[in-house]
Amino acid sequence: MPAKIIDGTAVARAMRADLEPQIAELKERGVTPGLTVVLVGQHPASQVYVRMKGKACEEAGLRSDTIRLAETTPESELLALIDRLNADPCVHGILVQLPLPRQISTHRVLHRILPGKDVDGFHPENVGKVAAGDPTGFRPATPYGVQQLLVRSGVETRGAHAVIVGRSNIVGRPMASLLLQDGPGGNATVTVCHSRTRDLPSVTRLADILVAAMGKPRFVTADMIRPGAVVIDVGVNRVDDPRKKKGYRLVGDVDFEPALGVASAITPVPGGVGPMTITMLLYNTVQAARQ
Ligand code: NDP
C-alpha cells in the first residue's frame, strides 16, 4: 500500500483556525500581536519568505511590519534598529531574516534581540530553554512545525526511534530537543546524523520516524528507509526543470516517488513542512504577546 501523504497545508490551516480565539481574546484586551520582520539586502528566496510571513500575519489578524534595509547596511545600524524594536511595546516578535550580508555578524544580531521577542527561537536563552524543556522558550518554527505535524497526524513519537539527518541550529538540533522532551510529540529515542556520520543508510534504516533536513535534493533514497517508517522531508531544493515557467521546481531531500512504496506516511515537498513553519511563527508571535 502506498504511503499516506501527510498534508501539511491542511494541518496548518486547522492550526491557524485554532489560533483565532487566542488572537481574538488578546484583541479584546487591547493587544494586537505584532511581528516585525527585518530584511537586509535582496536575497531572492528571503524576499519570498518575508512576503509569505507578512501575508500569513495579515490573514490571521496580526499586525505585521517589514523593514527593508540596503545590502550595504552596517552592522551598527541593524543593531540600533533592533534596540529600538526591543523597546517598542507594540512589537511582540522580531525576526531578522537570514542569511545576512557578510559585513554583519549573524551571531551578534541574534544575540541582540530580546529573548522575549525572539520568535525565531535562535537566541541562546531560548535555545537553552527549549533544550531544557521549558515551555516559555520559543521553539524554532520549522522543528516545532514538524512536531505538531506528527502530533496532529496521529504519529506516536513516544518510544519511537527518530533519526534526524542534519544538525543545523535551525532544524536538526532543535528537532532533537523537541523529540526528546517529556510530553506529546516527544519521548522519542533520538539519533542525529550529519555529514561525518559513518554508513548513513545503516542508521536511517533504523528509524521509525525519519526527518530529512540536509538540503540535498532527493538524497534519501527508498533503500535508506525502513519499511513502514514515517518520513518527514524538511528539505527545500530548487532543481532545473525546463517544463516549468520559472525553469525550476522544488524537491525535498527525499526521493519522493520511490519512498512512497516503502514508508507508511510521508510529507510532500511542497505542501508538507513548509506551511507548518509559517504557522508556528504565528503561534510564537501570539505566545510572545501573551507572555
Ligand atoms: P544546513 O545546510 O544548515 O544543514 C544541513 C545539515 O545536513 C548539516 O548538519 C550537514 O552536516 C547535514 N548534511 C549535509 N550533507 C549530508 C550528507 N551527505 N550526509 C549526512 N548529513 C549531511 O541546512 P538547514 O538545516 O538550514 O536546512 C536543511 C534543509 O531544510 C534545506 O533544504 C532547507 O532549505 C530546508 N529548510 C526548510 C524549511 C521549511 O520551512 N520547509 C525551513 C528551514 C530549512 P554537517 O553539519 O556535518 O555539515
Image (cartoon, grey):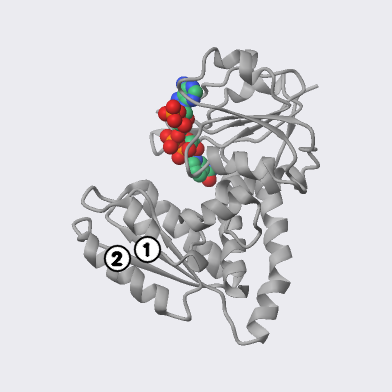
Query: Which residue occupies 72% across, 24% down?
Result: 263
Q: Nearer the viewer, residue 229 or 42?
A: 229
Can residue 97 be seen here? yes
Q: Residue 61's spot in the image, x, y percent? A: 59, 73
Query: Which residue occupies 65% across, 45% down?
Result: 178
Q: Earlier in the sequence, mark 2 or mark 1?
A: 2
The answer to whether mark 1 is within 8 Å of ligand 1 is no
Point out the image quarter for the C terminus.
bottom right
Query: Which residue position is annotated with label 2?
Result: 79
Q: Considering the numbered disc 1 on the image, is that residue within a helix, a strand or a loop?
A: helix
The answer to whether mark 2 is within 8 Å of ligand 1 is no
Q: Residue 264's spot in the image, x, y percent? A: 76, 27
Can residue 215 be seen here? no
**Residues under numbered marks 2 and 1 in contact, where contact means CB atoms less than 8 Å apart:** yes
Up/down of 164 relative to 22, above or below: above
Q: Amino acid at mark 2?
A: Leu
Query: Which residue occupies 62% across, 50% down?
Result: 132
Up/down of 21 relative to 126, above or below: below
Q: Considering the numbered disc 2 on the image, is that residue within a helix, a strand or a loop?
A: helix
Q: Residue 222's spot in the image, x, y percent? A: 63, 16
Point out the image quarter for the N terminus.
top right
Q: Residue 151's spot in the image, x, y percent? A: 76, 46
Query: Which residue occupies 68% across, 78% down?
Result: 24
Instruction: Describe residue 39's horizontal placement relative to residue 269 as left or right.
Output: left
Q: Mark on residue 112?
A: 1
